[in-house]
Image (spheres, grey):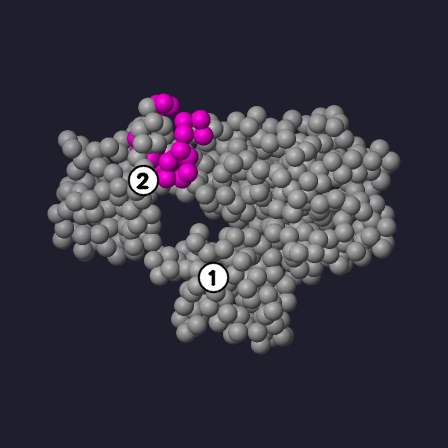
Amino acid sequence: MKWKKIELSDVKWQDIISDEIKISPMLAMILAVRGISNPEEAKRFLYPDLKDMHPPFLMKGMDEAVNRILQAVKNKQKIMIYGDYDVDGITATALLVRVLRSIEADVLFYLPNRFVDGYGLSMQGIDYAVSNAVSLIITVDCGISAKDVVDYGNQLGIDTIITDHHEPKEEMPSAYAVVNPKQGGCSYPDKDLAGVGIALKLIHALMQKTDVPISFSSLLPLAAIGTVADIVPITGENRIIVKHGLKLLSSTREPGLVSLLEVSGIRGKVVDTADVGFKLGPRLNASGRIEDAVLSLELLLSNTHHEAIRLAKMLDEKNTLRQQIQKEVLDEARQLVGHEDNKKVIVVAKDNWHQGVLGIVASKLVDEYGYPAIVIAYENENEKGKGSGRSIPQFHLLNGLIKCDELLETYGGHKHAAGISIKREMVDDFRRLINEHADKVLRDEDMGKGIDVFEINLEEVNPKLVWEMENLLAPFGIGNPRPVFSSFLVEMAGVPRLVGNNHLKLKVNSGTKQIEVIGFGLGKMFDDVSAMKKIHIAYRPQMNEWDGISTLQLNLKDVKW
């Protein structure tokens, strides 16, 4: 694995920030490397405040959207929230349904089924709205590319408000209002909100125009879950939402969330972004991946613990099934990675892969190989495939798809994740073309597994630094990754051991003390490390709680000698 040392070209900001706001030089360096170059910015980043969120009416289309919603409430018109089957869309739908019901709106919801409707606003959804006498549709996390479907709704007398965060295409839908900070002419400062973040801004705007008997802060846990799960940058307003939302999630009394925390094994603990990404998010996603996302939405809208725990256990079972299916598809996908045209972007395709796990498999391939990855499943041996892609920070995935526009039936997404549909006979050309584009924008050093490391003397690693990482620099995610540190010529203390399921455990000397090191899944390095007296280590420091005692521990990521 390659280690890339992170260095500051201008160290003056490190000293200024460290002295001004009383933080360690290492934390100040991390902030400076991430573009935070003065004490005021550093304070806003380390102590994100709800009052720093931008006024919602700065967003283009917000006035029209709010006025139309209030008109529908006043005139007792039926409103339908049209969501999406992923965590972002489910949480956004739950928020809007809950808030609109609280102001006595006549609300129903529609979540597309990925196996029937496909992604986004569909004709079937419009027909459902017509059959239920709906006058107004509000989309969340979708709709920005649905020009024909919006036209169909217009012809049938249904107004549509689009709230979305995906990149607009050149021709916008003729909706009653479009709320998307990425649309042309929108001067809203923060362009990186998730779909649930846009829904939250719409609710914030409604709260400024009418009495809503729900506190804004009570909505933040759901907004935080959707934001983290959608792999958007945890910076700007997203950081504010996630920081406050996760803190409130740990003490929530919402039956659906309490039950979800319970089946995930994290009730009663401080919830972090890793818990959302690996425990909460996958369970909420499971129903939409395997069958129908409505089960997850019903959990989030449930009012009793008895009903919520029943639904949460069902989700847990579906998540177990999802894991089994995912393993089978991933094993088969690995066998196809070696295609001669997979030089800088992995494109793999096969008949009858389960569509619900394609995005997760793509993420796993990115983690394992360090390349962008697109995983395509052909449907029952017919001529069309559906695919899901994930990327590395250096490669804008949607821009790559735009370069292949003529080969794709449909596509959409953003820098980090995207979805496509493509004819079978076009896949080989698509693989070749997107790799040609990647060859122009990616350098060889961008490719392959690697880690960015902050070099530090091991004696500087202490509980205070861990506290700063966990309480000030967190929450972590895209745009603010959890730091990895490196220390060189570290002296071994004693003999390494193998523990558990192939984990490497050892101790190293740091000044007058010894520090325990655990390398999960790194047992393959046991023989080499055992023969060394001094090693170079890349790690994340953490506090290990055992039997009421908290001690410093290094979570090993790689070893060199």
Q: Secondary structure at mark 1?
A: strand
Q: Secondary structure at mark 2?
A: loop
Q: Find residue 354 and report its horizontal and vertical position in percent.
A: 56, 64
**24 drawn magenta:** yes
Q: Find residue 236 and report its horizontal and vertical position in percent.
A: 52, 36
Q: Find residue 165 and report its horizontal and vertical position in percent.
A: 62, 47
> Is there any visible trace of residue 525 in the rendered image?
yes
Of the residues shown, which amino acid type is indicated by label 2?
Leu
- At a point 53% along the width and 30% down the height, the residue shown is 244
> Is there any visible trace of residue 98 in the rendered image?
no
Mark 2 sits on what residue?
8
Count neighbours of disc 2 (C-alpha within 10 A) and say few if under 14, some if 14 to 19, many if 20 or more: few
Discs 2, 1 touching: Cβ within 8 Å: no
Which of the numbered marks, if any, corresponds to residue 373? 1
Range shown magenta: 20-41
Which of the numbered marks, if any, corresponds to residue 487? none
Looking at the rendering, which quadrant does residue 542 occupy? top left
Left or right: 446 in relation to 150? left
Q: How many marks?
A: 2
Q: In the depicted view, which residue is nearer to us: 59 or 378?
A: 59
Helix, strand or loop for the magenta stretch, by majority: helix
Q: Alpha-carbon distance for marks 2 and 1?
A: 31 Å
